[in-house]
Image (cartoon, coloured by chain):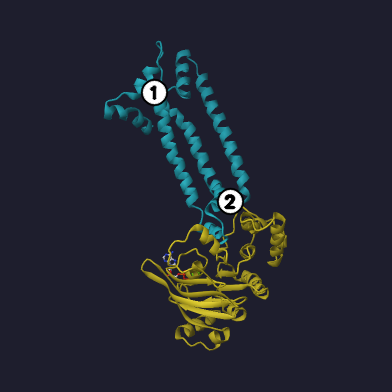
Amino acid sequence: MVILEVKNIKKSFGKTEVLKDISFSLEKGEVLAIIGSSGSGKTTLLRCLNFLENHDSGDIIVNGKLLSDGGEGDLKEEKLRENRLHFGLVFQQFNLFPQYTVLQNITLAPTLLKKGSAEEIEKNALKLIDKVDLNEKRDFYPHELSGGQQQRVAIARALALDPEILCFDEPTSALDPELTGEVLKVIRELKGSDNTMIIVTHEMNFAKNVADKIIFMADGIIEEMGTPEEIFNNPKSEKLKVFIEKAFSEK
Amino acid sequence: MLQIFIIYYVPSLIFGSTIWRDINLYFTTGDTLSYTGSIIAVLIAFVINYACYFSEIYRGGIESISKGQYEAGYVLGLTKSQIFKKIILKQVVKRIVPPMSNEIITLIKDTALANCIMVGEIIYKANTLAAEEQLIWPLFFAGVFYLIFVGILTIVLGKIEKKLSYFRS
Ligand SMILES: Nc1ncnc2c1ncn2[C@@H]1O[C@H](COP(=O)(O)OP(=O)(O)O)[C@@H](O)[C@H]1O
Ligand SMILES: [Mg+2]
């Protein structure tokens, strides 16, 4: 079942065209990895999907429902919020709320959005805390946690609203190398529980092992799209060949 | 002080009006001169001056919160007012309390400037008394009064600061 269809998305900042006609679709439960050198438009694409950025034209369709065709420019706040709830986003910089504990970070949005009784929300949050393996840290504040732990809280926070599609923007790039493993492990486990995910990452091995489908972006277009097999073992585009060569030689 | 002079003297320079003195005279009964007009002029100067300082502190505090905090709220489907009330506000308060403490204490000390247009604030009164009675005590007590006043405020603001020290942002 197709859960997400993106059709001909375009986005410019002033005169610079950052996304030039991006189209792809995603099945429910599928994991899509997006790779590409920095500046190729990966973050902008995720921000458009999460309605943090207004794309200029093109359709975003979730479960067959057209959320936005970019045309109307600024959507009403109400509609924007409704659209955003289809997606979740985990930021590179975590962006946890510093004045709240781990548990409170996770329960804040469901509580404000009245997603159930206080007990239900807390019970669900505790389940998520267990899922990201932070049981001992539930009453800690963000500044008392390592980067890897903070990012796992951020993942639990996003999951608390049960988004149809969960997006990650380089979830491990702000982490020390020894902390990336624990975050990647959590993401990998989410795949098992049938979450649809879009992951922008520089971790090539992770992309190769976890993704069902990979998009290689270059200069605002999808330069190549395929299975990990096709992308890594049989790249067609010259740019992709160079990119892969470089990515693996840096390791 | 400059602001007080401007508020007090400029109207008369430009319009030839003597508004503050007129008010003084209007409230004067008998032979003790009233300073109501001067006091109003001083109040206006202080309010405008410190409103500027404080709004500048608030603005700086609000702008210093990273865009990521708002965006984290947006992607969780929160409204702008929920984001401000539940996420941003406390962080702003935490950031503005220290500069506000400084500014409030400066404000208290600045009240002494009012005597430049003959408004009888604490130091002015103490000075007059000291001169009349040939005593040093009135000035000393004025000092003690400042000390107590500033002390209380420092303690209160320190409490707020401490209360917000459980998180870092
Ligand atoms: N808000 C913005 N205003 C202007 N230019 C931007 C903005 N955001 C991104 N860009 C530009 O868009 C291009 C793509 O950026 P980005 O989507 O962050 O790429 P990536 O995530 O692949 O590194 C870059 O050239 C960047 O300078
Ligand atoms: Mg990026």
Mark 2 residue element: helix
Residue located at (47% from left, 52% from top): B63
Give left or right: position of A86 versus A57. right
Marks counted in the figure total: 2
Give left or right: position of B107 versus B165. left
Q: Which residue is mark 1?
A: B37
Question: Where is residue B60 shown, x and y percent of the image?
Answer: 47, 48
Label 1 vs label 2: CA separation? 44 Å
Q: Nearer the viewer, mark 1 or mark 2?
A: 2
Q: Colour of chain A?
A: yellow
Q: Which residue is mark 2?
A: B86
Label 1 marks a residue whose chain is B
Q: Say which chain is cyan.
A: B
Label 2 marks a residue whose chain is B
Q: Is residue B140 above or below residue B70?
A: above
Question: Where is residue B138 shown, x and y percent of the image?
Answer: 51, 19
Mark 1 residue element: helix
Give left or right: position of B26 versus B62. left
Nearest to the observer: residue A83 or residue B53? A83
Question: Where is residue A1 shown, x and y percent of the image?
Answer: 60, 78
